[in-house]
Image (cartoon, helix red, strand yellow):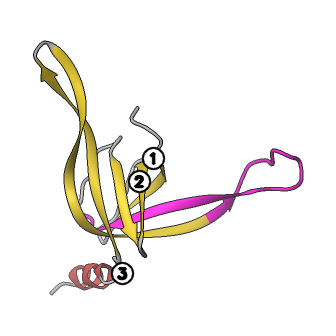
């Protein structure tokens, strides 16, 4: 077993969540193009991590506000298309997210910054 395999196995023990990846795919209904949700990955081990960063300004002028940052950690071989919906269950809570940027792919894992899912674009 290589050193990187050992690192990946260790990180895998931290994946306490599960996620489903849903894409909004088009299909033809006769001559009409329609869209539907298609689940392309289910029960993928993952881990959510939460942090906060100071916001650039405060809406009420009473000091800097904090913005929550949510990241999803996955194995490096998991590919998620931009625009996908990620439904994550961790610690008994299920929440739908979407990507807010390009995934950071490392040899040991992938990090995706998330935002709450509002609607399909």
| Residue 36: x %, y % from top left | 24, 34
In-front residue for pair 94/62: 94
| Distance CA(mark 3)–CA(mark 2) | 21 Å
* Mark 2 → mark 1, Cα distance in angstroms: 5 Å
Q: Which of these two is toward me, 28 or 115?
A: 28
In terms of sequence position, does the residue under pointer 2 or pointer 1 come before the other? 2
Is 5 positioned to the left or the right of 99 in the image? left
Q: x, y percentage for residue 23? A: 26, 42
Tags 3 and 2 touching, CB below 8 Å: no
Residue in view at x 31 percent, y 84 percent:
13
**Displayed quadrant of residue 84:** top left
Note whether 3 is above or below 27 in the view shown: below
Q: Which residue is mark 3?
A: 14
Callout 3 secondary element: loop
Q: How far across and down, in percent of the image, does residue 104 sit? A: 39, 57
Q: Where's residue 57, x and y in %?
A: 79, 47
- The reply to whether residue 24 is in sight is yes
Residue drawn at (72%, 52%), measured in percent from left and top?
A: 55
In primary-sequence order, the first of circles 3 and 2 is 3
Looking at the rendering, the stretch of residues picked out in magenta corresponds to: 52-77
| Above/below status of 39 relative to 37 | below
- Secondary element type, mark 1: loop
Name the element at disc 2: strand
**Residue at image mark 2:** 96
The Cα–Cα distance between marks 1 and 3, rounded to whole angstroms, is: 24 Å
User: How many numbered dots are placed on residues in this image?
Assistant: 3
Front residue of 92/104: it is 92
Identity of the residue furthest to the left in this view? 30
Disc 2 to disc 1: CB gap under 8 Å: yes
């Amino acid at each position: 077993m290589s050193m990187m395999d050992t690192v990946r196995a260790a990180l895998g023990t931290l994946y306490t969540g599960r996620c489903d990846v849903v894409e909004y795919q088009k299909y033809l209904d006769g001559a009409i193009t329609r869209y539907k949700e298609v689940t392309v990955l289910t029960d993928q081990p993952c881990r959510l991590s939460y942090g906060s960063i100071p916001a650039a300004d405060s809406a009420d002028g009473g000091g800097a506000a904090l913005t929550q940052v949510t990241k999803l950690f996955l194995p490096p071989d998991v590919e998620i298309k931009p625009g996908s919906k990620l439904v994550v269950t961790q610690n008994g809570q299920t929440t739908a997210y979407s990507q807010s940027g390009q995934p950071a792919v490392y040899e040991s894992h992938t990090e995706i910054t998330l935002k709450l899912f509002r609607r399909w674009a």
